Image (cartoon, rainbow, N blue to C red):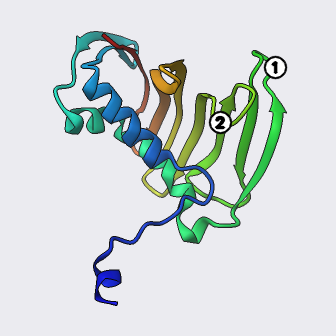
């Protein structure tokens, strides 16, 4: 009985386990000493960089924004998303599973694109939207995967969006990262 109290509580992801997916990607990318070519544009000003995140903490910081998608799995959000599976993607040969909010939640939708079966994940796309008395913020989050060593491996990611402060200017940004595995 005491041992059950000491065990860490494992919560099952209700809709999509993005946290586990990101953790597996981090472990693989660290092991393979992967590098990132990153391009960022903010209000028309472009900046490029290439770097090798040195450890799992650095990769976690790099991919942290995508963990916001995990809020769909919070117990309070159960039943607040409509799930549609088996949708054809008009731009590829992939199939789409779409979660769309039925109420006002920050994650408006999550689409997972897969080849033949959901285990062959090729892309995740999500829309994050927040509006309050101070600001309006919108971000489209995208992660793309390929099959490498019979595993789904992250090959690129992007964040596109903007923020409008009600008392200030708008900020528009695009961040694109391309991952190279050695």
Q: Is residue 166 visible?
A: no
Q: Position of residue 60 (x, y in %)?
A: 29, 39
Q: Is any part of residue 71 visible from this angle? A: yes
Q: Report, in whole angstroms, how far the alpha carbon at label 2 lies from the one at label 1.
A: 14 Å
Residue 55 in the image: state x and y as whole percent: 18, 32
Which residue occupies 63% across, 54% down?
Answer: 15
- Element marked by disc 1: loop
| Image height of 137 relative to 114, above or below | below
Q: Is residue 136 above or below residue 105?
A: above
Mark 2 or 1: in front is 2
Q: Which residue is mark 2?
A: 112
x 34%, y 90%: residue: 1
Q: Is residue 130 left or right of residue 78?
A: left
Tell me residue 91's x, y (percent). 76, 15
Q: Quadrant of the C terminus?
A: top left
Residue at the (47%, 20%) spot, across then down: 149
Q: Can you identify the residue that label 1 sits on?
A: 90
> Residue 41, located in which quarter of the rendered image?
top left
Q: Secondary structure at mark 2?
A: strand
Tell me what residue is drawn at x 76 percent, y 51 percent. Answer: 83
Q: Nearer the viewer, residue 61 or 128?
A: 61
């Amino acid at each position: 009985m005491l041992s059950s109290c000491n065990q860490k509580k494992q919560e099952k992801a209700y809709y999509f386990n993005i946290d586990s997916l990101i953790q597996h990607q981090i472990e693989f990318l660290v092991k393979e000493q992967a590098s990132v070519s990153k391009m960022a544009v903010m209000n028309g000003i472009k900046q490029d960089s290439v770097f090798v995140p040195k450890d799992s903490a650095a990769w976690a910081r790099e991919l942290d924004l995508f963990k916001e998608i995990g809020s769909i799995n919070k117990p309070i959000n159960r039943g607040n998303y409509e799930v549609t599976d088996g949708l054809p993607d008009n731009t590829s040969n992939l199939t789409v599973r779409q979660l769309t909010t039925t109420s006002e939640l920050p994650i408006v939708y999550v689409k997972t694109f897969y080849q033949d079966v959901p285990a062959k994940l090729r892309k995740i796309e999500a829309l994050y939207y927040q509006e309050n008395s101070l600001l309006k913020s919108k971000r489209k989050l995208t992660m793309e995967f390929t099959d490498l060593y019979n595993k789904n491996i992250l090959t690129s990611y992007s964040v596109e969006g903007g923020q409008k402060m009600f008392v200030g200017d708008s900020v528009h940004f695009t961040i694109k990262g391309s991952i190279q595995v050695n």
